[in-house]
C-alpha cells in the first residue's frame, strides 16, 4: 500500500484530486464512488476543477434499503448534491433502495458491475474497519448483497438523520470481492476517530474481522490519511 500522510482533509482532497487526474490520463473511465463525510473534500476539488466526466461511468458502493432516490438521506441524493449535479457522468449507477424485489435489485447491480469493471475505486473506512457496508466478519469474496448494519455504523451515521431510530438497519452494498476487482483503489481517512482502523488496515493482520485489512492483498492501493488518522501508524 502506498500511504500519503497530509496535514488535513482539505489537503487530502487535493491529493485525491491528483490521483483522479493521473488515472484519467492513463485512460480510466469507470469510477467506483463512496459517500459519507470523508470524500466531501475530494468531490469539492473535482467540482471546482475543469475535469470532464461526461464520457465516464460511476458505480456507487452502497445505498440504504428503504430510501427512495429523492430522499435527502439517500446516497443517491448525496451523490447528486456533492458531485453529479455539477459534474455529470455519462452513466451513474447506485443501488435502488426503493426496489420492490430485493433479489432482482442485487442481480441488477451485480450485472452492472460485470458490465462496468471499475478502474478506480474510492473508499472511506468505518471506525470498525468496514469498507462499503461490509461490516466485520463479512465474507471476503462477496458480491453485492443486502447487509445488516452494525450498531456502531448506525450510531456513526445517525448524524445525518433526525435521530438514531430513523437510520435504516439494512443497506445494499458491493461486497469485498467486488471491491477487490477494481484495478486501482484509493482509500481516504481523516480524523483521530479513524486512527485505530487505519493502523489495522495497513499494519494489522489480514482478517475478515477488519474488512479494510483485506486491501493489503490488492496490488494497487493508495491510502490518503491526515496526521490524526495516521497517529497510530508505526
Ligand atoms: C460510504 C461507505 C462507508 C463510508 C464509511 C466512512 O459509501 O461505503 O464505508 O465510507 O462509513 O464514513 P464517513 O466518511 O462518513 O466517516
Image (cartoon, helix red, strand yellow):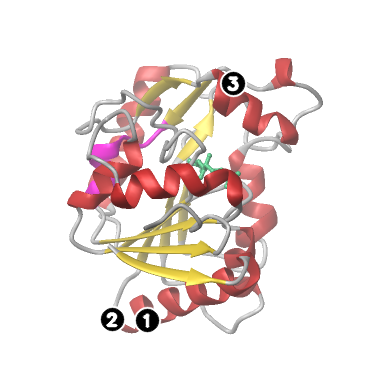
Q: Which residue is mark 1?
A: 22
> In the image, is 152 to the left or to the right of 201?
right
Q: What secondary structure is marked by label 2?
A: loop
What number is the disc on residue 87? none
Residue at 35% of width from left, 22% of height from top? 104
Q: Which mark is residue 66?
A: 3
Q: Residue at x 78, y 22 (%)?
A: 163
- What is the magenta range? 173-181
Structural crowding at the residue carrying mark 1, measured as other residues with C-alpha within 10 Å and reported as few (<14), some (14–19) or many (≥20)? few
Return the x and y of residue 31 as percentages of the image width and height: 39, 60
Distance from Cα at disc 3 to Cα at disc 2: 38 Å
Q: Return the mark for residue 26.
A: 2
Q: Are marks 2 and 1 in contact (CB under 8 Å)?
A: yes
Residue 175 lies, with reference to residue 16, above or below; the image says above
Q: Kindly state the secondary structure of the residue where label 3 is placed.
A: loop
Queried whether the magenta region covers residue 177, the answer comes back as yes
Q: Which residue is at a point 20% across and 54% down the rendered structure image?
A: 218
Q: Residue at x 27, y 49 (%)?
A: 215
In terms of sequence position, does the residue under pointer 1 or pointer 3 come before the other? 1
Position in image of residue 73 (x %, y %): 70, 35
Name the residue furthest right.
162
**Element type where label 1 sits in the image:** helix
Amino acid at each position: 500500500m502506498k500511504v500519503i500522510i497530509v496535514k488535513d482533509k482539505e489537503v487530502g482532497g487535493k491529493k485525491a484530486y491528483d490521483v483522479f487526474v493521473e488515472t484519467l490520463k492513463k485512460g480510466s473511465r469507470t469510477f467506483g464512488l463512496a459517500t459519507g463525510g470523508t470524500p466531501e473534500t475530494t468531490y469539492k476539488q473535482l467540482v471546482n476543477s475543469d475535469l470532464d466526466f461526461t464520457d465516464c461511468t460511476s458505480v456507487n458502493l452502497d445505498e440504504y434499503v428503504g430510501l427512495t432516490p429523492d430522499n435527502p438521506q439517500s446516497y443517491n441524493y448525496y451523490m447528486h448534491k456533492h458531485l453529479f449535479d455539477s459534474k455529470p457522468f455519462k452513466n451513474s449507477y447506485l443501488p435502488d433502495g426503493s426496489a420492490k424485489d430485493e433479489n432482482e435489485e442485487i442481480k441488477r447491480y451485480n450485472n452492472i458491475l460485470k458490465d462496468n469493471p471499475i478502474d478506480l475505486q474510492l473508499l472511506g473506512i468505518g471506525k470498525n474497519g468496514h469498507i462499503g457496508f461490509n461490516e466485520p466478519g463479512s465474507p471476503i469474496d462477496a458480491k453485492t448483497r443486502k447487509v445488516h448494519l452494525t450498531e456502531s455504523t448506525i450510531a456513526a451515521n445517525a448524524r445525518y438523520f433526525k435521530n438514531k431510530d430513523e437510520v435504516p438497519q439494512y443497506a445494499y452494498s458491493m461486497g469485498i470481492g467486488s471491491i477487490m476487482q477494481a484495478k486501482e483503489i484509493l482509500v481516504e481517512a481523516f480524523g483521530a476517530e479513524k486512527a485505530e482502523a487505519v493502523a489495522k488496515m495497513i499494519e494489522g493482520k489480514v482478517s475478515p474481522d477488519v474488512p479494510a485489512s483485506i486491501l493489503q492483498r490488492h496490488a494497487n492501493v493508495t491510502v490518503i490519511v491526515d496526521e490524526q488518522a495516521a497517529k497510530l501508524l508505526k
